[in-house]
Image: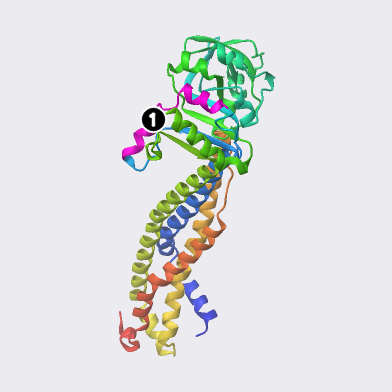
Amino acid sequence: MNLKYSLKTSFEALRANKSRSVLTILGIVIGITAIILIMSIGQGGQDLILSQIQGMGATTLAVQPGREPKGFSDMASLFSDSLKEKDYLALKKKSNVPSVVEVMPEVITSATLSFEGETKQVSVIGASEVLAEILNIYPSEGSFFTEEDIIARNSVVVIGSEVREDLFGFSEAVGQKIRIKNRDFRVVGVFPQKGQVSMFNMDSMAVVPHTTAQKYLTGTNYYNEIILKAVSEAAVPQAVREIEATLRESHNITDPSKDDFQIHTQADLVERVSTITNILTALLLSIATISLIVGGIGIMNIMLVSVTERTREIGLRKAVGATQKDILTQFLLESVLLTGIGGVIGIIAGAILAFLISLILSQVLKLNWAFSFPVSAAIAGLLVAGLVGLIFGIYPAKKAAAKDPIEALRYE
């Protein structure tokens, strides 16, 4: 019996039991669909986060309060208030950090903005005029607030295009006063429609002077982050050393292990995000693999039932000259065909679901999410599906091939 005839016979056997074949491959379909979905969404999420991080440029550094977490017991340090005004002023001194050209503190909070009955919940960033240069985004209407506004703690705000549309519609926004936490803020500028820039959605945020944010919005005397820009990408390592030395002196720290701050470069963040997303993807893939194992066990059970039901057929084939190898090949092919078909269906279903989810995330949630089809995962999924069919089909195929032809022909 040649391979072509074995394939034809296997297809006919599967078509003769369509309902059972469909139910048999369901576990494989679910498993492969889950793998494609996880890989596609994982890659899309990683690309989104990395593009946000890289949006600040390779020369940008971020100083955050609290020591670097070494375990769960250190997580509380992330909420430290160790970055104060004296640290910001020390970092602004060119003599302390000659490799740095810009320094900007950040105060981050959320608040409800209101104007003549219209309200909108947004993220409010307390920053300096340097924000526009670091993120390379400048107001399309009006202007950014000035250093004088920061010193005087003036109640001025620059809003995103989405905030402008929701609060003012087609009316003029610059010069109007909006309410933020029971205080009137004068709109001095409006950002153009930009979407996600670094970790910020510029369309749905408001930016105020950091001094104003501390005094009127948060009531705090510390910063959530300090952003710095090095003179060049090559100068980033030197800038890190200068920042460490300046902050240790400011905090009277002599032992580096006692640092109460963290410095992250864009390269560090990219590496961290890639590591985290890869670990999460691997974890989810291991869970999805369980579906393939369950599906494989289901296929083995169904094939065993098929062997029993087709005992007389096996006896007849052996009686007319089929060898044990022929019978073994036929049943193995049936098993591999089942899982292979399930793999193809799973790849198609996974791609469709991943595309729909990407569409929802990009169109409904307004995220800069790109659809990603993992070709390598599709190929691997198809190979794994075939391998599952081969492994779980061996025992039923051997049992079929080992049947005695005389006893098989007598089977009722």
Q: Residue at x 52, y 39 (%)?
A: 240
**Residue 360 x, y percent position in the rendering:** 54, 38
Q: Nearer the viewer, residue 256 or 268?
A: 256
Q: Residue at x 40, y 71 (%)?
A: 391
Q: Is residue 46 above or below residue 304?
A: above
Q: Residues within 10 Å of mark 1 (few under 14, many from 20)?
A: few
Q: Nearer the viewer, residue 139 or 329?
A: 139
- Count of labels in the image: 1
Is 120 on the left or on the right of 318, as rendered?
Answer: right
- Residue 200 at least partly seen: yes
Q: Main secondary structure of the magenta part?
A: helix
**Residue 347 x, y percent position in the rendering:** 52, 57
Numbered range of the magenta stretch: 73-93
Give the SS element for disc 1: helix
Dividing the picture into quadrants, the one containing residue 163 is top right
Q: Nearer the viewer, residue 158 or 93?
A: 93
Q: How is the image coloured?
A: rainbow
Dividing the picture into quadrants, the one containing residue 365 is top right
**Residue 145 x, y percent position in the rendering:** 62, 17
Is 147 on the left or on the right of 182, as rendered?
Answer: right
Q: Is residue 344 above or below residue 359?
A: below
**Residue 152 x, y percent position in the rendering:** 56, 11
**Mark 1 residue type:** Phe
Residue 95 belongs to the span the image colors magenta = no
The quarter of the image holding the C terminus is: bottom left
- Residue 154 at least partly seen: no
Q: Kindly identify which residue carries mark 1.
A: 79
Residue 85 belongs to the span the image colors magenta = yes
